[in-house]
Image: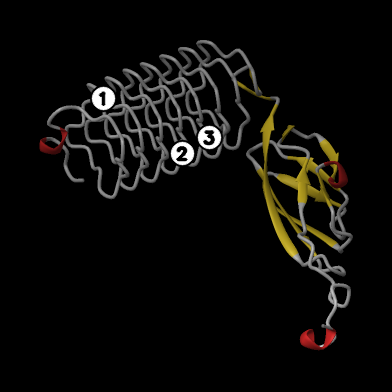
Amino acid sequence: MASLFGGVTANSVAAATSTTVTWKVSSLTVKATKNLSDIASSNSPGVKTWSKSGSCTLTPASKPTKLIMGSTGACRLTLKIAKSGQYPAKSFTKTILREGFKVNGYTIRHNANLTGANLWDANLTGANLEYANLTGADLTRATLTGANLQYANLWDATLWYANLTGAKLYSAILAVADLTRANLTGANLEYATLTGATLTRATLTGANLQYANLTGANLTGANLTGANLWDANLTGANLNGANLTYATLEDATLPDGWQDIVAAY
C-alpha cells in the first residue's frame, strides 16, 4: 500500500494551520493608552509588526507595544504576522472608533443620551455612537464618516448636508429624519427604519438598504446608483427623479408607477 503513494504518510507533510487574530477592542476613549497585546491576540507565534493610520499613536516608534487613542477621528490598525512553522504569514486590519470626547459640551460615546443636541458642523469622524439617543438632534453639516450609529435613535433628527460616508447605520431609527442632500455613499442601512424620512437629493451610491423600511420616504432626486434595495419597503415613497441605475431591486416593494418617474434604473 505504501508503494502506491510513494512512501508519503500523513505525518511526513505538516498540515498548514490558519493564522487567526482575535480583536478585543473596537473603540477607545480619547487619549486612552492600551497595550497592543490587549487589543489583539493571535494563535500564531510569528513575529508581529504593527502600523497605523488615522488618529492614534503607536509607541515606542520602533517595535511599538502601546497605542494612544487620538482626538480627531478613528484609528486604523494593521497587524502583519510573519510565517512561523505551519502558520502562514497574514495581514489584518481593524478600525478603532473614538468615544468619550466632547463636542459643544456633549459627551460623544456609545449609548449616550443626546436628545435635541446641537451638533451642527461637528466632527464626528469615526465616532462610536452605537445605541445613542439622538432624537431631534441637529447634525446639519456634521461629519460622520465611518461612524458607528448601529441601533442609534435618530428619530426627527436634522442631517442636512451631513457626511455619513461609510457610516454603520444597521437597524438605526431615522423615521421622519431630514437627510436633505446628505452623503450616505457606501453606508450600511440594513434593517434601518426610514419611514417618512426626507432624502431629497441625498447621495446613496452603493449604500446597503437591504430590508430597510422606506415607507413614505421622500427620495426626490436621490442618487441610488448601485444601492442594495433587496427586500426593502418603499411603499408610498416619492422616487421622482431618483437615479436607480444598477440598483438591486429584487423583492423590493416599490410604489405604483415608479418606472415612469425615476430618472434612470
Mark 3 to mark 1 CA distance (whole Å): 21 Å
Q: Amino acid at mark 1?
A: Asn
Question: Dot 2, crowdedness within 10 Å: few (<14), some or many (≥20)?
Answer: many
Q: Position of residue 142 (x, y in %)?
A: 48, 30
Q: Which residue is mark 2?
A: 187
The residue at 41%/25% (across/down) is 159
Q: Nearer the viewer, residue 218 or 215?
A: 215
- Which amino acid, mark 3? Lys
Q: Are marks 3 and 2 in contact (CB under 8 Å)?
A: yes
Mark closer to the chain start, 1 or 2 = 2
**Along the polypeptide, which appears first: circle 3 or circle 1?**
3
Q: Position of residue 149 (x, y in %)?
A: 55, 28
Q: Nearer the viewer, residue 78 or 81?
A: 81
| Percent of width and height locating residue 92 | 70, 55
Residue bearing the label numbered 3? 168
- On residue 218, the disc is 1
113 displayed left or right of 193: right
How many neighbours does mark 1 have within 10 angstroms: few (below 14), some (14-19), or many (20 or more)?
many
Query: How far apart in space, not on screen, are marks 1 and 2 (Cα)?
Result: 18 Å
Front-most of 233 and 31? 233
**Label 2 element class:** loop
